[in-house]
Image (cartoon, rainbow, N blue to C red):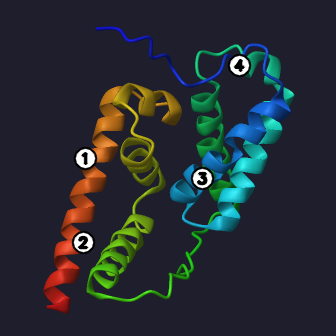
């Protein structure tokens, strides 16, 4: 039964670049942080992507999904900067809330362990996992953003999850 629910995304064909950025920059920064593992690298990737998107806004706003188009630009900007530098960046531990307790402590420890393992994944695998589980995208959309086939996107996610499980199990055995 159709109850008249429509897609919450506004029609971007007439939307100005500034208005679109104002509405989407926070989500782009969160996405970029998960892809890059660093606040600084995330800001750089988003800035580069937004600069390019501004230059091409007439074309970008006419696409079926400008958000996906710009997310792909963010991933490409990060990969390009990584290739230019020729080195890996190490992430810095994030400051956590001061509340304590068994549930919060376990959740923080588990989240930290998963994030540390994620930072060790190859960039394409990490991007695929972020797109799949954080952005909740389908494999076809992931493939489009990462500029690969759908089978390759599935492979990236599968290999990343296999690596994550193996590394977390290894760490659990050495800790316990």
Mark 1 or 4: in front is: 4
Q: Are marks 2 and 3 in contact (CB under 8 Å)?
A: no
Mark number, residue 12: 4
Q: Mark 1 vs mark 4: which is more N-terminal?
A: 4
Q: Secondary structure at mark 3?
A: helix
* Residue at 40% in and 74% down: 116
Q: Secondary structure at mark 1?
A: helix
Other residues around mark 4 within 10 Å, as few (<14) / some (14–19) / many (≥20): some
Q: Mark 2 vs mark 3: which is more N-terminal?
A: 3
Mark 2 or 4: in front is: 4
Other residues around mark 2 within 10 Å, as few (<14) / some (14–19) / many (≥20): some
Residue 63 horizontal side relative to residue 102, left or right: right
Residue 89 horizontal side relative to residue 118, left or right: right
Mark number, residue 32: 3
Distance in Å between CA atoms under marks 2 and 4: 43 Å
Q: Mark 4 vs mark 3: which is more N-terminal?
A: 4
Mark 1 or 3: in front is: 3
Q: Which residue is mark 1?
A: 158
Q: Which residue is mark 2?
A: 167
Distance in Å between CA atoms under marks 4 and 3: 22 Å
Other residues around mark 1 within 10 Å, as few (<14) / some (14–19) / many (≥20): some
């Amino acid at each position: 039964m159709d109850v008249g629910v429509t897609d919450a995304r506004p029609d971007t064909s007439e939307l100005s670049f500034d208005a679109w950025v104002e509405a989407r920059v926070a989500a782009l920064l969160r996405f970029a942080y998960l892809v890059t593992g660093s606040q600084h690298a995330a800001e750089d990737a988003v800035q580069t992507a937004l600069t390019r998107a501004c230059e091409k806004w007439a074309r970008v706003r006419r696409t079926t999904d400008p958000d996906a188009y710009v997310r792909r630009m963010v991933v490409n900007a990060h990969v390009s900067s990584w290739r230019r530098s020729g080195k890996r960046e190490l992430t810095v531990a994030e400051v956590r809330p001061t509340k304590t307790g068994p549930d919060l402590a376990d959740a923080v420890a588990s989240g930290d362990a998963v994030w540390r393992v994620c930072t060790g994944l190859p960039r394409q695998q990490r991007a695929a996992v972020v797109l799949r589980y954080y952005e909740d995208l389908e494999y076809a959309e992931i493939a489009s953003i990462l500029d690969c086939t759908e089978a390759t996107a599935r492979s990236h996610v599968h290999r990343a999850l296999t690596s994550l499980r193996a590394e977390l199990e290894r760490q659990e055995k050495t800790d316990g």
